[in-house]
Image (cartoon, helix red, strand yellow):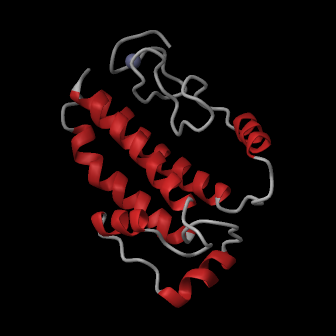
Amino acid sequence: MSAFLVAWGDVVSGAHGLVDQALEVDPLGGTSVAWSASLKQLKVTPIEEDERLPTCQKNKQTKGAPVPEVHAALQAFVSSKRALVLATLTPEQRTVAEAGLVTLLEHAKAHYAQKASEPVKRGLFKHAKVTASKHQYGTKSGPEVYVMECPVCRGPRQTESLSCVFCGADL
Ligand SMILES: [Zn+2]
């Protein structure tokens, strides 16, 4: 597998990991050892203790770490991986990968905001089905893929492109 696809896969799974970690924060507006460690690693300053719950309430959250804190962490994470993702690419591939990073960040942020404001009492199975039906992009990697991907190499792709710029496969 190319260096690019390894780096890209790390970004996708890393963004998912951060969202999952932030959703597991309990109680609402609290933190966890894992989440605190991620913030520290990404050099994101945590929201102040007495601002955490009000921030969550302002964002209509039912669970997790405060939305602006998670968004800042996702932003920092994607930025930190950008150079590595783009390092080995041709100009054409870079364009697609850059757009892929932007889309991934937007979708990961939106995904967190949505998940963190869902009613907590709803059944998990029902919730999963509702989420799956809402997502139009990327059907190969399950309901929560953030970017449309090539079915062959799983690199990011653009809606209008006819072939994959990373492996040449027809789309
Ligand atoms: Zn491909």
Position in image of residue 74 (x %, y %): 43, 57
Closer-to-camera residue (168/61): 61
User: Which quarter is ligand 1 in?
Assistant: top left
Q: Residue furthest left?
A: 88
Q: Is residue 81 above or below residue 92?
A: below
The quadrant the N terminus occupies is: top left
Side of 138 where 134 appears, left or right: right
Q: Residue furthest top?
A: 170
Side of 136 where 156 appears, left or right: left
What residue is rendered at 41% in x and 77% in y? 46
Closer-to-camera residue (126/95): 126
Position in image of residue 13 (x %, y %): 42, 41
What residue is rendered at 49% in x and 64% in y? 70
Position in image of residue 130 (x %, y %): 77, 40
What residue is rendered at 59% in x and 30% in y? 142
| Location of residue 89 by image quarter | top left
Q: Residue furthest bottom?
A: 50
Q: Is residue 101 above or below residue 3?
A: below
| Location of residue 37 by image quarter | bottom left
Q: Is residue 160 above or below residue 135?
A: above
Side of 99 where 110 appears, left or right: right
